[in-house]
Image (cartoon, rainbow, N blue to C red):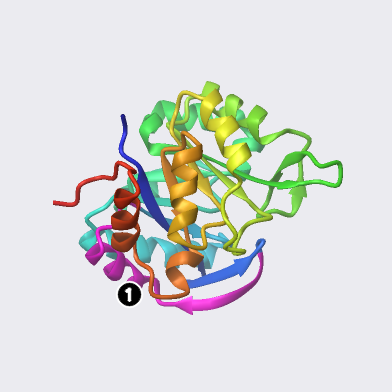
Amino acid sequence: MLKKRVIPVLLLNNGRMVKGKQFQNFIDTGNPSTAVKIYTSQYADELMFIDIKASLESRKALIDIISNAAKDALMPLTVGGGIKKIEQIREILACGADKVLITTSAYENSDFILEAVKYFGSQAIIGGIDYKLDRDEKNYVWTHCGTKKTKISPLEFSLKLQDLGVGEIMINSIDRDGMMKGYDLELMSLISNKLDIPIIACGGAGNFGHLVDLYKNTDVAAAACSSIFHFGDNCPMQARTYMRNHGIEMRNIK
């Protein structure tokens, strides 16, 4: 059995960390370089950077951050945000990242995913899904940082991404983003039981109990977290200890 992972997520805008709620009202939360050093010292399993604007200027700042982080980080690094071209993936991986997260382009251009998997291998490509509940009480995938609705369900799109060859899928609840009220256990259980590749759950972690609930009630491989670590005194090492004490198999750090 694969041991569970906890992945801190750093949202970036023009070189600074930011955090919002439900993809809105972002506030500055600090220097990402400082956060990388802290998470490295706390033995985070992995670290994920997501560029929420993905402009040309922001991209340069992101590359600088990743290059510096790769010098000190002892964990795999994932980078996402506005990735549309093979050349972008090559640049990101060349500066020290291990994986890329592709969300909007994964929906808009299936051939791009096929090409990315062919060039870099499935282990380097994470498919991203942002979703929220609609008025008809059904979940739909949304793209472009949660601003454009599609007609496809998270489960249907997850199965498509698996067929395209991605190595993992991160599924993010827009409704729960930043709300710290727990993960969408029903959907995470459904998708993780249907797919054969690792699923990363994102959106909702507010305390360590939410992580335990996620792992005890679903088959997801990893929990992506942001607010739980950015606001308060919680850290990945404490989360790992708490979950191990509740019977969750975690990665050994020594």
Under mark 1, the amino acid is Thr
Residue drawn at x 41%, y 38% is 221
Whether residue 42 is visible to the viewer of this picture, yes or no, is yes
Q: Is residue 207 above or below residue 245?
A: below
Whether residue 86 is visible to the viewer of this picture, yes or no, is no
| Residue 43: in magenta span | yes
Secondary structure found at label 1: helix
Q: The N terminus lies in which quarter of the figure?
A: top left
| Percent position of residue 75, x then y | 26, 52
Relative placement, left or right, of 254 versus 50 is left
Which residue has dot 1 on it? 34
Relative placement, left or right, of 114 versus 251 is right
| Percent position of residue 76, x then y | 30, 49
Q: Is residue 28 above or below residue 139?
A: below
Q: Which residues are magenta?
A: 24-46
Locate residue 10: give its quadrant.
bottom left
Q: Is residue 233 above or below residue 49?
A: below
